[in-house]
Image: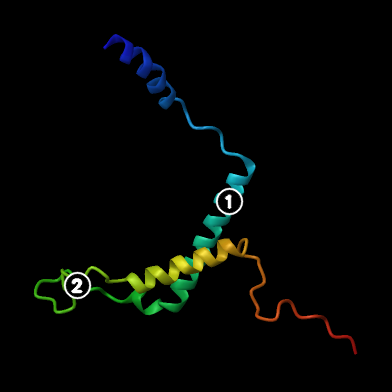
Amino acid sequence: MSRLIVLLLPMALLQCAPPPAPTGQSKADAATLNACRERADAAYDRTHRDSIYSISSRDSPFSANYTPGVVDRGLPQRYGRDSMVRDCVRNTGTETDRTPGGPAAPSTP
């Protein structure tokens, strides 16, 4: 029994150590993810303005708008936002040019 304690004590103490300090790359990744989330939220707010300013009656008594058993309520919107964030991160941030033909070449007369 004491042998087991001697073996497990150092492993338990290692688990109490603080995590390593974040590197520059992980900080940049976190900043990119945060910027992409803000951009996706702003795009959602622009396209779903009616849902922002509408008064919800789902919690009112005898409301016909709320069905407690529906578990996929809001799932398409959530998927759209998550897809937008994932595409933004994959394309390396918010300043990436996403036009189909790429950047347009300047025309010279």
Relative placement, left or right, of 103 versus 81 is right
Q: Residue at x 49, y 72 (%)?
A: 43
What's under tag 2, amino acid-wise?
Arg
In the rendering, at what x and y percent does residue 68 appear? 15, 69
**Disc 2 designates what residue?**
58
Q: Residue at x 83, y 81 (%)?
A: 106
Q: Secondary structure at mark 1?
A: helix
Q: Secondary structure at mark 2?
A: loop
Quadrant where the N terminus sits is top left
**Disc 1 designates what residue?**
29
Q: Residue at x 31, y 15 (%)?
A: 4
Which corner quadrant of the image does residue 109 belong to?
Answer: bottom right
Relative placement, left or right, of 109 versus 53 is right
Question: Tag 1 or tag 2, which sits nearer the N-term?
Answer: 1
Front in this rendered view, residue 63 or 107: 107
Which corner quadrant of the image does residue 69 belong to?
Answer: bottom left
In the rendering, at what x and y percent does residue 99 appear? 65, 78
Q: Residues within 10 Å of mark 1 (few under 14, many from 20)?
A: some
Q: Residues within 10 Å of mark 2 (few under 14, many from 20)?
A: few
Q: Is residue 34 above or below residue 47?
A: above
Farthest residue, direction bottom: 109
Q: Residue at x 67, y 72 (%)?
A: 97
What's under tag 1, amino acid-wise?
Asp
Q: Is residue 31 above or below residue 55?
A: above
